[in-house]
Image (tube, rainbow, N blue to C red):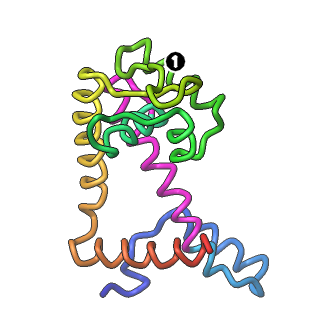
Amino acid sequence: MSTPEQRPRDAVDAVVEAWAQVRPDLDTAGMEVFGRVFRLARAMGDRMEEAYGTYGISRGEFDVLATLRRGGEPYTLSPRALSAALMLTTGGMTGRLDKLERAGLLRRSPDPHDRRGLQVTLTEAGLRLIDAAAGAGLAAQTEALSALDGDRSAQLAGLLRELLVATER
């Protein structure tokens, strides 16, 4: 294990040190974790946007297609179920569905079980695109995780899971 003097420094280290100079009474342990989590989320969000952009879709559009794909055949959900799964308003979902439908990646059709309802289904083109985009996104994540060996990556995933579960209670 490296000593603090041997560890690489990041922007959070500078922020924590600055706070220590002006407010040595503050406990910055949370900042050391969440500052890095926020910065990592932003950096990886940019990488994911780039990976999906090569397929002509945004991260939000990827999420819609991926949610349909993960549901298995026939790759169909209601707009309401998609909105709930992605924690989006129906208005926000409508914009994404409109764009993806225009691109031929999904289709909306009447729900055969509810005359007032719609269902959203991946098209063959949407299925091919989401499978390729998911592979590209996972490759970008794997590349980023290559900074850690497998054991440390698994340890980090476990620690983050514990923290997330505790925080979402």
Of the pair 145 and 14, the residue shown nearer to us: 145
119 shown above or below 148: above
The spot of residue 40 in percent (x, y) is 47, 57
The spot of residue 125 in percent (x, y) is 26, 20
The spot of residue 71 in percent (x, y) is 34, 45
Of the pair 165 and 124, the residue shown nearer to us: 124
Give the left or right position of residue 72, taking residue 80 as reference. left
Q: Which residues are magenta?
A: 33-58
46 shown above or below 5: above
Residue 69 highlighted magenta (yes or no): no
Question: Secondary structure beneath disc 1?
Answer: helix
The spot of residue 34 in percent (x, y) is 58, 68
Quadrant containing the N terminus in the rendered view: bottom left
Disc 1 target residue: 98
Kind of residue at badge 1: Asp
96 shown above or below 7: above
Of the pair 19 and 72, the residue shown nearer to us: 72
Quadrant containing the C terminus in the rendered view: bottom right
Which residue is found at the position 56% from the left and 66% from the top?
12
